[in-house]
Amino acid sequence: MSGTIGVFDSGVGGLSVLHHIRRLLPHEQLIYIADSGHVPYGDKSASFIEQRSLALTRFLVEQGADAIVVACNTATAAAITTLRQHYTLPIIGMEPAVKPAVAATQSGVVGVLATTGTLESARFAALLERYAGEVEIITQGCPGLVEQVERGDLLSAQTRSLLERYTAPLLARGADTLILGCTHYPFLAPLIGEVVGPNITLVDTGEAVARQLQHRLHTELPQRIPSIASVRFFTSGDVEHTTRIMSLLWGEMVVANTFYAPVPGHP
Ligand code: DGL
């Protein structure tokens, strides 16, 4: 049986995870949806994100997906429990890389850059409870950063100044390891590296999620056979703009198709 892997995010950030998936599973058919019409998720209510996640997953399943990757920390925190109640197929989520960061830190202080939605979630509190141990974890919400990536603005003075503002308090308190707790942020890693300097370790979970997906496919869908590799892209936002930014971040020319699923009471 050949299958399709469905991947979604609030916007283009989940492409940072899709890169790892394609590298590890080059023969798979992949479908990616950017919910660009509703980005950012970081300041939206959990119930809104749940509705969007259900609509996105439904579409991916209709397109033949037999496994789903929620390539968004914020949507995972808000909606993965509901998604798993509605669907029995493998659903892999993302969470900030607290465990590897705790293993990596020498100073005993770790900073977490993420959306407010992720940082305020019960899932994140449980993650800290489980893995932080003796390490001091300092969190930093980063309003505006997702929007910079959505604009394809990875290097401007404005993006740099946001990064300086968000990382300075973490460095001042002795953090030597920073968690990129939002799938948009790996696209800013070169600039973050410039801002914080070479002695600070940056960690994210994109690669681990791709490995987790590979493992779940092997164990839960062992009859799967390699298919003709393909990647299809969809957006609920402006097709021309998203096509341009996706092409930039994916590293080759891609075409975004329209995905339309209104949420009752919202445009
Ligand atoms: N890429 C999403 C995440 O991982 C961004 C959330 C947002 O749209 O604010 O958290």
Image: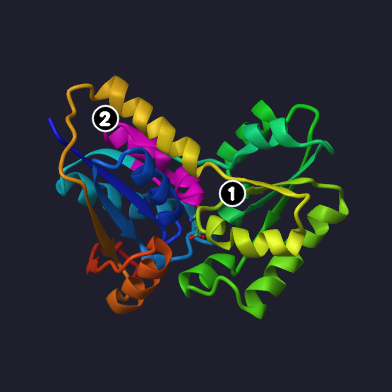
Above/below status of 39 relative to 104: below
C-alpha gap between disc 1 and disc 2 = 27 Å
Residue at the spot 55% in from the left edge and 53% down from the top edge: 182
Q: Is residue 194 above or below residue 66?
A: below
Q: Residue at x 20, y 44 (%)?
A: 61
- The amino acid pointed to by label 1 is Gly
* Side of 234 relative to 213 (left or right): left
Residue 126 horizontal/vertical position (percent): 61, 32
- Front residue (pair 56, 197): 197
| Residue 223 drawn in magenta | no
Where the C terminus falls, by quadrant?
bottom left
**Foreground residue among 163 and 227:** 227
Residue 19 appears left or right of 221: right
Picture coordinates of residue 62, whole percent (x, y): 15, 47
* Residue of label 1: 181
Q: Tell me if residue 71 is in the magenta stretch.
A: yes
- Residue 153 location (% of width, % of height): 53, 75
Element under disc 1: loop
Examine the image and state in which quarter residue 235 appears. Answer: bottom left
- Tell me the magenta residue range: 69-92
**Residue type at the position of mark 2:** Thr
Q: Residues within 10 Å of mark 1 (few under 14, many from 20)?
A: many
Residue 249's disc number: none
The nearer-to-camera label among 1 and 2 is: 1
> Which residue in the structure is indicated by mark 2?
88
**In which quadrant is the N terminus drawn?**
top left
Residue at figure coordinates x 35%, y 52% from the top left: 8
Q: How many marks?
A: 2
